[in-house]
Image (cartoon, helix red, strand yellow):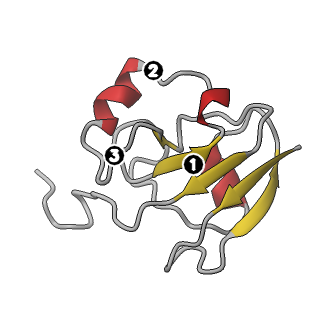
Amino acid sequence: MVQLIVLPHVELCPEGTVIEAESGHTICDTLLEHGIEIEHACERSCACTTCHVILREGYDSLEPAEEDEEDLLDKAWGLEPTSRLSCQATIGNEALVIEIPKYTINMVSEGKRK
């Protein structure tokens, strides 16, 4: 088991939390399984940026992002060098410190769907 340390997020996890997670699962699935309702508008299909997270520690332990993920990350709000889409980032064998950004860009919920 690997620890996921989720930093406080006003709406999703006000106190922050520590999760015992299994290697090989995505960050998004693990957060959802533990009651942290991170947005995932595309149902985890790598077609949006709503599940964007920032890895404050452990980024280098993740497999590199695929090209599709990299392309989408360019559109994420608050992008940082250690940003990932949580639906694509698979947990390895090292603890992760995760920040869920305050905002997300969701064209569907913002009424901007084309």
Q: Nearer the viewer, residue 5 or 47?
A: 5
Task: Residue type at mark 1: give it.
Answer: Arg
User: Mark 2 vs mark 1: which is more N-terminal?
Assistant: 1
Q: Nearer the viewer, mark 2 or mark 3?
A: 3
Disc 3 packing (10 Å; few <14; some 14–19; many ≥20): some
User: Mark 3 vs mark 1: which is more N-terminal?
Assistant: 1
Secondary structure at numbered mark 3: loop
The image quadrant where one finds the N terminus is top right
Secondary structure at numbered mark 1: strand
According to the picture, the residue beneath numbered tag 1 turns out to be 56
Q: Nearer the viewer, mark 3 or mark 1?
A: 1
Disc 2 packing (10 Å; few <14; some 14–19; many ≥20): few
Percent coordinates x, y for residue 48 in the rendering: 33, 44
Task: Residue type at mark 3: give it.
Answer: Leu
Percent coordinates x, y for residue 76 in the rendering: 30, 47
Is residue 38 rendered to the left or right of residue 26?
A: left
Dots 2, 3 in contact, CB < 8 A: no
Q: Is residue 96 shown above or below 93?
A: below
Q: Nearer the viewer, mark 2 or mark 1?
A: 1
According to the picture, the residue beneath numbered tag 3 turns out to be 79
**CA gap, disc 2 to disc 1?**
20 Å
Percent coordinates x, y for residue 59 in the rendering: 59, 35
**CA gap, disc 3 to disc 1?**
13 Å
According to the picture, the residue beneath numbered tag 2 turns out to be 66
Secondary structure at numbered mark 2: loop
**Going 32% across and 53% down the picture, which residue do you hit?**
78
* Marker count (numbered): 3
Is residue 39 rendered to the left or right of residue 109?
A: right
